[in-house]
Amino acid sequence: AESAAGDTEYRGFYAKNNHGTLTLVDARIYISSNTTSPDSTFAIALADEAVSTTIETIANESTAPVGPSFSAPADYASGLQLNSGTGLAAAAYKGVWIRRVITAGAAAVTGDSGTIKVEGETS
């Protein structure tokens, strides 16, 4: 039913520096490979909330978060900085939103997937 009509869904998650002492400097998140289906795509956005703060709750998966701007950066250079140039301190986390769009009339695909990466340097 969703593929016939098309569908847009949102999910929130956190990118966390799980190291005990090191900062992840110039930490960026990007989509290293978008979905494998030609009938779907995803984009990401940083949550508006500060680092290490719980992101907003949305009413349901069809409700967009208020404020964030979605894009599809495809490499580190164009990636979204998780905490400006400061990076993520040890144990810090930043909220991220993902938007998945299925086009109307999408063909069935088994195992549709993509990859989101977080990269940075440690100090």
Image (cartoon, grey):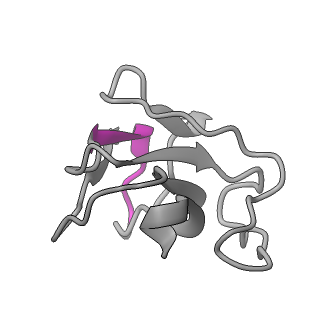
Q: Is residue 5 above or below residue 20?
A: above
> 67 or 80: nearer the eye?
67
Q: Is residue 16 above or below residue 57?
A: above
* Residue at the image point whose x is 25% and y is 53% from the top: 114
* Residue at the image point whose x is 41% and y is 61% from the top: 17
> Is residue 100 shown in magenta?
no
Numbered label tally: 0
Left-right relation of 31 to 51: left
| Quadrant hosting residue 74 | top left
- Name the residue furthest top: 77
> 35 or 14: nearer the eye?
35
Find residue 22 and report its horizontal and vertical position in percent: 36, 55
Residue 91 in view of the camera? no
Q: Magenta stretch: dominant SS?
A: strand
Q: Which residues are magenta?
A: 21-32
Residue 58 in view of the camera? yes
> 90 or 75: nearer the eye?
75
> Is residue 26 shown in magenta?
yes
On-image quarter of the C terminus: top left
Left-right relation of 55 to 22: right
Find residue 29 and report its horizontal and vertical position in percent: 41, 43
* Residue at the image point whose x is 73% and y is 45% from the top: 68
Find residue 76 and report its horizontal and vertical position in percent: 32, 28
| Quadrant hosting residue 33 | top left
Find residue 107 and report its horizontal and vertical position in percent: 27, 58
- Name the residue furthest left: 110
